[in-house]
Image (cartoon, grey):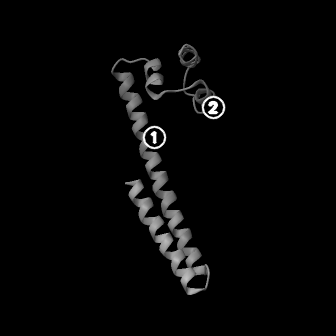
Amino acid sequence: MLEEFRKRKLKYMDELFLECRQSGEGLSSYATEKIKGVVSDLIGEVEEEMNLNMAEQQLLGFHHRNTGYEIESLCEGMGLTKKEFDKLGEQGMIEYLTDEEKEDIENFIINL
């Protein structure tokens, strides 16, 4: 879905640039505003896709836990690295984990 949207928008922008070049006017304020609109639409689509992916990941993690798997198997499934885990910690994105859970993850990652 997102890839098709990108292709359409990029094709539109290419046509707009070509039209401006052929007219000899360069990028008019009209064309500039049209391009800003295209970029804004694309950013909105990317944000929507990212939000859907995050929701899917959260639901998958919830399901994973409810089916009896431990946090280590979830980390293995996502291919979490020490560098990524450290960055999550630095950005305050794992505050909800207990110290014991953080230690379990660190021990698992170190032993990979």
Amino acid type at mark 2: Lys
* Residue sitting farthest toward the front: 22
Mark linked to residue 87: 2
Residue 77 or residue 51, whichever sits in front: 77
Residue shown at 56% from the left, 20% from the top: 98
- Nearest the eye: 24 or 95: 24
SS under mark 2: helix
Image position, residue 52 (x, y; %)? 41, 45
Q: Determine the CA span between mark 2 and mark 1.
A: 17 Å
Of marks 2 and 1, which one's residue comes earlier in the chain? 1
Left or right of 41 on screen, residue 83: right
Relative image position of residue 23 (x, y in whole percent): 55, 86
Image spot of residue 110 (x, y percent): 58, 16
Above or below — where is 57 with respect to 50? above
Residue at 54 percent of width and 75 percent of height: 17
Between circles 2 and 1, the one closer to the viewer is 2
Query: Seen from this angle, which residue lies furthest right?
Result: 90
Residue annotated with mark 1: 54
Q: Which label number is shown at residue 8?
A: none
| 29 w.r.t. 68: above or below | below
On screen, residue 81 above or below 30: above
Proximity of marks 2 and 1: CB atoms separated by less than 8 Å: no
Amino acid on which disc 1 is placed: Met
Disc 2: CA contacts within 10 A as few (<14), some (14-19) or many (>=20): few
Quarter placement of the N terminus: bottom left
Image quadrant where residue 93 sits: top right
Circle 1 — which element? helix
Please provide percent x and percent y for residue 56.
39, 38
Q: Is residue 87 above or below residue 13?
A: above
Q: Which residue does the image show at 37% across and 25% down from the upper left?
A: 64
In the image, 43 versus 9, the foreground residue is 9
